[in-house]
Image (tube, grey):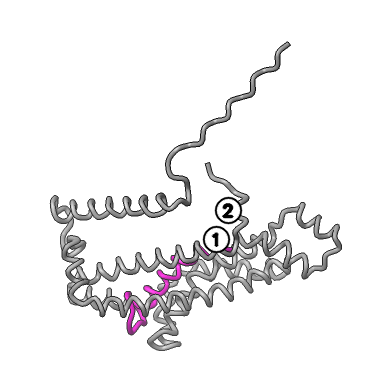
Amino acid sequence: MSEPAPAPVPAPRSGPRRGTGAGTVLLPSAGLLVALGVWWLLTSVLTMIHPALLPPPGAVLSSFTATPARFLEHTGDTTVETVAGFALSTVCGVLIGLSLAASPLLERMFTPLLVAVNAVPKIALGPLLVGALGWGQKPVLTMVFLLCFFPIVLSTATGLTSTPADLAELARSLDASRWQTFRKVRLPAALPQIFVGLKVAMPLAAIGAVIGEFQAGESGLGYLIVQASGVGDAAAAWVAIILIGLMSILLYFALVLAERFALPWVRETTTRD
């Protein structure tokens, strides 16, 4: 009796793979062109949106090119506040997450309080922060911290308490100390989850910086939006809004790049069809 013929090996899929240079650059560029086309169509051709609400792309570009140094200076201020507040949130959030993961008692005691603090509308705290900290960067950084530390705490605690059972059993079988188990097993296993929290928190940090600048800032893109809106300069306000979006995209993908360098094994051991 003849043996059955081996099953044919499926041919590899054509087209750009996830993570290739073509897909990384061309697809976002195509999406941006589509968005610009819809914007131009709605504001310049169909005139469905009033220019005081959304000016045409040409007017926004002209506003930027008229005083680019002013916009870039405010962008730099907002970027510094966003990164500084995010770094502070990362340090404090990881430490709090470590504490909650290490002690079930602390977790039961303080998790409801953390949830309650996260549920408070942060914009309502703006006047209190101004009264307590004055104008400038302090209330802005505090707003960034309040807005983005909770996802970092949650992801850190979740990652450290979700160590695969086989890895934990392997560490015990090798008589690893608690510190060795944490450093060699629990922390590496938790890092992907921690980076998920960091990537969630990064856009929130930019939002927190802008909200803080709305209420207490003396510079920055949020401050610029308030000033431009006060004099009816919608084009300048939209320049600031677009720069906030671009800044957030760059910071987010910088974090993604840092994750790839810090966790090279994640891309090698996972796949996406």
Furthest-front residue in this view: 2
Give the number of the disc on residue 260: 1
The N terminus appears in which quarter of the rendering? top right
SS class, disc 2: helix
The residue carrying mark 2 is 267
Kindly indicate the quadrant of the structure image that contains residue 235: bottom left
Verify whether residue 205 appears in magenta.
Answer: yes
Furthest-top residue in this view: 1
Q: Residue at x 55, y 68 (%)?
A: 150
Q: Nearer the viewer, residue 253 or 129?
A: 253
* Left or right of 217, for residue 193: right
Q: Where is residue 67 in the image (x, y as percent from the top left)?
A: 21, 77
SS class, disc 1: helix
The answer to whether the residue labelled 1 contacts the one labelled 2, judged by CB atoms less than 8 Å apart, is yes
The residues colored magenta run 194-221
Q: Which residue is drawn at 14% across and 50% down?
A: 46
Instruction: Identify residue type, mark 2.
Output: Arg
Callout 1 environment at 10 Å: few (<14), some (14 to 19), or many (20+)? few
In the rendered image, the vertical position of residue 68 relative to residue 33, given as above or below: below
Q: Residue at x 20, y 69 (%)?
A: 234
Q: Nearer the viewer, residue 123 or 157?
A: 157
Callout 2 environment at 10 Å: few (<14), some (14 to 19), or many (20+)? few
Q: Which residue is drawn at 59% across and 64% down?
A: 262
First in sequence: mark 1 or mark 2?
A: 1
Q: Where is residue 81 in the image (x, y as percent from the top left)?
A: 42, 78
Instruction: Identify residue type, mark 1.
Output: Arg
Number of numbered tags placed on the structure image: 2
Q: How much space separates mark 1 and mark 2, taking CA atoms?
A: 8 Å
Q: Nearer the viewer, residue 31 or 205?
A: 31
Verify whether residue 19 appears in magenta.
Answer: no
* Left or right of 174, for residue 81: left
Give the number of the disc on residue 58: none
